[in-house]
Amino acid sequence: MNFLRLLAAFFKVSVMGEVAYRVNFFFQIFQTFLSLVVSLGGLAVIFSYTDTLGGWGPQEILALVGVYFLVGGIIGLVIQPGMEKLIESVRDGTLDFTLTKPEDTQLIVSIGRIDIWRLIDILLGLGIMIAALIGLGEKVGLWQAGMFLLMLTVGGTIIYCFFLILATLSFWFVRIENILVIFQSMYEAGRWPVSLYPPWLRYGLTFVVPIAFATTVPAEALTGRLNWETLLGAVALALVLLVISRLIWRVGLRHYSGASA
Amino acid sequence: MKALAGLYVQQFKTTMAAMFQYRASLLIWMIGQVLEPLIYLIVWSAVSTSAGGSVGSYTTRDFAGYFVVLMLVNQFSYTWIMYEFEYRVREGILSFALLKPVHPIHSDIADNVSSKLLTLPVMVLIAVGLAAAFHASISPQPWAVLVFIPVMLMAFIVRFLLEWTLALAAFWTTRVSAINQTYFVLMLFLSGQIAPLTLLPYPVQIIADILPFRWMIGFPVELLLGKLSPVEALIGLGAQAAWILIGFVLLRIVWKAGTKVYSAVGA
């Protein structure tokens, strides 16, 4: 409950800060629109030559694109801004102020900065998913929907832990703001099912940079192709990463010496 | 002329020093340059496999060749000036460049060429590795290889002139990222980065022939893959020459108008 209260408070602050820059809203819409054009245009060309791509039909790939926008929106809304801020504040020492607050520092750092305009991506992602689901029809039932929500949470958790571990490295290596940019360019690969990629790239996108869990796995759940091994593996990985990232965070925090102190 | 040569040498040294300083940024940028064509390579290989081994005039191995060559061509003609100019105008850095007795485009050319001298060998290695991994087929006729050299140079000149001119939009607005992104989306479809242009719908192909994007990327790639006849290659060279002329004239006009409206921040 405390978490929700804090989240609502930070969200309110972000909204108040951003309404002064309303033009940004239109720029985000425009940017999202262009990204949509690239996705759908590419799909239109590809599916004019084939009916399935790596075993996925057009509607299923469309659902994946929806998940891609949705998860990309969630990462851009809350995960990435918070981690960028963490790296900045370790460098310039403003983390001192966060440490003095009575709440858990990891929690405040994680939701402390919100880029509200990325809600547009989330809405668009949901829209695309609904359009794809209408096309898929009765193949999607309550079970799939439930599994999808579970896998979305699991995938989100894995990505969050991944970001947190990378950002925590800034306690040791101060100049690592670029490391988050790598994720940005690799996330493009999540537009397509990872089963398409050759093994080395598939393992890379699953275990090195866990993009597969962010987009492919939830989309698999939604389209009813998720198997038990993937499901259990993903849940286990999320739990393990939660513990590990928390441990690294605590060791890192002990390593932090402040800039002005 | 001698002074200009001195400037190029000096810029070369500066760029090299800067690049060795920012190795990590360089690596990140390279991942992006490799990943995008690699994804489309994989996607089109899958399409081709499921369509029975070929799509249009492209076999699965042709697709591998196409996107590997595209990666190199794109790397060769790439510029980053559109990202930089807004910063120069906003921060007033351009004022110093304007005080110098030579046109600021020279240091940009030198900077671009120098950094490519360093990155191109790495990209060639990556390309060779990918070509081997995906069994790429690249078998051009000898004449096509010869013609490729001037075609590639002209592709670079077209792209450099047009993107440098477009970057000048920063004189009028500080919101250039919307312009840049629109440009890159158009480029993605109309230059052949998303798929070989002959696979796109016919009306799109005509638009691609008229606009400059194909002549910056798609045309050199198709030439080196052996997909073009000598006549088509000649037409392409003509289109490139025309776009160089247009780009040059546009650059002069826009630069003149832009420097007139420029008022540096803090000046």
Image (cartoon, rainbow, N blue to C red):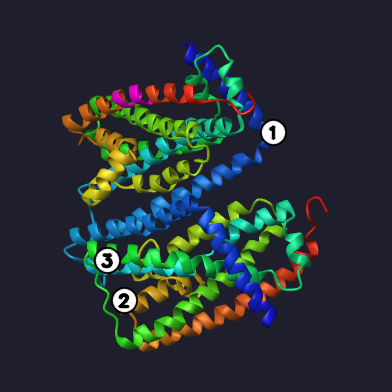
| Image quarter of the C terminus of chain A | top right
Q: Nearer the viewer, residue A218 or B144?
A: B144
At which x and y percent is residue B202? 38, 70
Residue under numbered circle 1: A20
Residue at the (25%, 25%) spot, across then down: A236
The answer to whether B247 appears left or right of A169 in the picture is right
Label 1 crowd (10 A; few <14 / some 14-19 / many >=20):
few
Which residue in the structure is indicated by mark 3? B131
Residue B183 visible within the image: yes
Q: Chain of mark 3?
A: B
Label 1, secondary structure: give it. Answer: helix
- The image quadrant that residue B100 belongs to is bottom right
Per the rendered image, the range of residues in magenta is A240-245
Decide if residue B238 is on the left or right side of residue A235.
Answer: right
Question: How crowded is the residue under tag 3: few (<14 C-alpha within 10 Å), some, or many (20+)?
Answer: many
Q: Amino acid at mark 1?
A: Ala
Residue A111 among those drawn in magenta: no
